[in-house]
Image: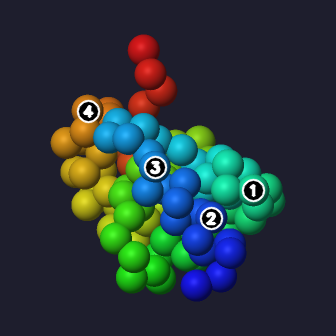
Amino acid sequence: MSDFEADVLAVVASLAPGDVVTYGEAAAEAGHPGAARAVGTLLRTTRVDVPWWRVVAAGGHLRAGNPAEQARLLGEEGVLVVNGRVAPPA
């Protein structure tokens, strides 16, 4: 596993239920600003069990391979998803 992979997976694994970050935020937090697309690719391809559903595209858009599943998992954690997008906190 590369340092990039380990760094990003550690950030995603540390997200608590109900926390949502963008791919760009996850990349920056992992020490790899500007690597949002690489974060998306990693989460689509990794076999490591991490809460991938807590990471969304810019603007809160669901972009995972299965947006219905992502919306369901986020909803179970109390995150409101409307029209394929995480609703901003009230």
Q: How far apart are marks 2 and 1 (CA)?
A: 7 Å
Q: Residue 14 carries which label?
A: 3
Which is more foreground, mark 4 or mark 2? Answer: 2
Q: Residue at x 48, y 26 (%)?
A: 88
Q: How far apart are marks 3 and 2 (CA)?
A: 11 Å
Ranked by sequence position, the earlier of labels 4 and 3 is: 3
**In the rendered structure, which amino acid carries the disc numbered 2?**
Asp
Q: Residue 49: horizontal and vertical position, in percent?
A: 34, 70
* Residue corresponding to mark 2: 7
* Residue corresponding to mark 4: 78
**In the rendered structure, which amino acid carries the disc numbered 3?**
Ser
Ranked by sequence position, the earlier of labels 4 and 1 is: 1
Ranked by sequence position, the earlier of labels 4 and 2 is: 2
**Left or right of 68 on screen, residue 84:** right
Q: Is residue 86 visible?
A: no
Instruction: Please state which of residues 46 and 71 is positioned toward the viewer in this rendering.
Output: 46
Ranked by sequence position, the earlier of labels 1 and 3 is: 3
**In the rendered structure, which amino acid carries the disc numbered 4?**
Gly
Residues at marks 2 and 1 touching, judged by CB atoms closer than 8 Å: yes
Which quadrant of the view contains residue 76? top left
Q: Residue at x 59, y 42 (%)?
A: 59
**In the rendered structure, which amino acid carries the disc numbered 1?**
Gly
* Residue corresponding to mark 1: 31
Residues at marks 4 and 3 touching, judged by CB atoms closer than 8 Å: no
Q: Residue 48: horizontal and vertical position, in percent?
A: 39, 76
- Image: 41 above or below 79: below
Numbered disc 2: secondary structure? helix
Q: Distance between the residues labelled 4 and 2?
A: 27 Å
Which quadrant of the view contains residue 68? bottom left
